[in-house]
Image (cartoon, grey):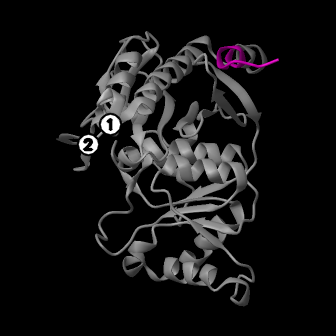
């Protein structure tokens, strides 16, 4: 019997005492992502490709679908009485929602949007936190990733898939022809070892010595210090990279580099690194900024950037060790 996402959530309420309010928030996110997926699927037919003529708080040019996906999620979450506030990669500041809501939702509405116009996989990444007591402000959101109550992503690819964790393993759902997410895999595990890595090699001239050494060792193959041949992948969509690692292992890297030493990395801690790191932890993988576990980082700002190394445990530990020398 096929288990739908709402049925799965009801089982979580019964088996793990998951709150009905948190379940409601998860259902709202999933439903919004079905709507986003419909827009992504239609593409040029719906006139949603191309740039929006605007920029986000990061100074990045926005695609039309960035704006559309952001609006869909904000409108859906504002309508849920259990959401106290939300924060988006595309918004300058947080957005207040229901005054008596219990949860905060953070999201990257359309990760990998540079791929939209060339029909390569993109996705939505989300994170759910408990709202602390007191008035809602930016500090309410600045919680370490270890405090996430739920995290996940929706991958808009050949299939639309929802990957979610509530801190009790990872579950994968696939959207069927009736726009229902059906459970298709439970508890996937990232193998501790791998022969696959993902990094933007065009930045190699800017890498610091430990990253350069690591990649050189991988490229040396079976005659090098690692004693095996590695394949490289790079999709330029974090959701696609993480999903591949979740399904078959690998290591994904977006390190700090010498272009702007004041920036600790490119990816956002709250919208990308934290939710993906929780998924990795729950699937037996690891995620670090080369010095500490990402889930342990105490955030200083909503749009804080961070270096990211995630995936197969042994590779992440090896990269950390190179940086510790």
Would you call the spot at circle 1 few (<14 residues within 10 Å), some (14-19), or many (20 or more)? many
Residue 17 % position (x, y): 71, 17
Residue 270 in the figure: left or right of residue 174: left
> Does the magenta-highlighted stretch encompass residue 231?
no
What residue is shown at x 47% (from left), y 29% (from top)?
37
Give the percent coordinates (x, y) of residue 86: 37, 27
Q: Residue at x 75, y 83 (%)?
A: 227
Between the residue at mark 1 and the residue at mark 2, the CA separation in whole angstroms equals 6 Å
Which residue is nearer to you in this view: 21 or 31? 31
Instruction: Label 2, secondary structure: give it.
Output: strand
Left/right placement of residue 317 relative to residue 45 reads: right
Horizontally, is 14 left or right of 36 in the view?
Answer: right
Which quadrant of the rendered structure holds the N terminus? Answer: top right
Residue at 32% over, 25% down = 71
The label on residue 228 is none
7 inside magenta stretch: yes
Task: Report the residue marked by disc 1.
Answer: 66
SS at circle 1: helix
Looking at the image, residue 253 lies above or below residue 205 = above
The circle drawn on residue 62 is 2
Q: Nearer the viewer, residue 136 or 197?
A: 197
Q: Is residue 246 left or right of residue 61?
A: right
Up the image or down, 17 lies above or below 193; here it is above
Q: Are marks 1 and 2 in contact (CB under 8 Å)?
A: yes
Query: Horizontal and vertical percent for residue 154?
Result: 54, 34
Q: How many residues crowd around disc 2 within 10 Å: few (fewer than 14), some, or many (20 or more)?
A: some
Q: Looking at the picture, how far across and down is residue 264, in whole percent?
A: 37, 63
Residue ranking furthest to the right: 1
Q: Is residue 299 visible?
A: no
Q: Which residues are magenta?
A: 1-9
Asked if residue 285 shows in the view, the reply is yes
Q: Residue furthest front?
A: 45
């Amino acid at each position: 019997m096929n288990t739908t996402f709402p049925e799965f959530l009801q089982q979580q309420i019964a088996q793990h005492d998951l709150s009905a309010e948190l379940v409601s928030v998860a259902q709202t996110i999933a439903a919004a992502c079905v709507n986003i997926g419909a827009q992504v699927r239609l593409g040029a037919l719906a006139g949603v490709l191309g740039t929006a003529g605007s920029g986000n708080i990061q100074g990045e040019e926005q695609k039309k679908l960035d704006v559309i996906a952001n609006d869909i999620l904000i409108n859906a979450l504002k309508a849920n009485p259990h959401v106290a506030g939300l924060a988006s990669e595309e918004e300058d500041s947080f957005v207040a929602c229901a005054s008596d809501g219990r949860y905060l939702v953070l999201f990257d509405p359309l990760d990998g949007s540079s791929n939209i116009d060339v029909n390569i996989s993109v996705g939505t990444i989300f994170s759910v936190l408990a709202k602390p007591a007191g008035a809602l402000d930016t500090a309410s959101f600045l919680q370490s990733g270890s405090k996430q109550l739920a995290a996940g992503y929706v991958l808009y690819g050949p299939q639309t898939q929802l990957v979610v964790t509530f801190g009790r393993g990872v579950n994968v759902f696939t959207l069927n022809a009736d726009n229902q997410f059906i459970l298709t895999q439970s508890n996937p595990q990232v193998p501790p070892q791998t022969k696959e890595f993902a990094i933007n090699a065009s930045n190699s001239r800017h890498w610091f010595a430990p990253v350069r050494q690591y990649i050189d060792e991988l490229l040396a193959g079976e005659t090098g210090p690692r004693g095996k041949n590695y394949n490289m992948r790079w999709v330029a969509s974090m959701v696609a990279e993480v999903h591949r690692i979740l399904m078959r292992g690998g290591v994904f890297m977006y390190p700090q580099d010498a272009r702007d030493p004041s920036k600790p990395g490119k990816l956002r801690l709250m919208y990308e690194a934290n939710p993906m790191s929780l998924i990795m932890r729950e699937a037996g993988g690891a995620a670090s900024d080369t010095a500490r576990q990402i889930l342990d980082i105490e955030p200083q700002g909503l749009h804080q950037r961070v270096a990211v190394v995630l995936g197969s445990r042994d590779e992440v530990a090896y990269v950390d060790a190179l940086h510790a020398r």
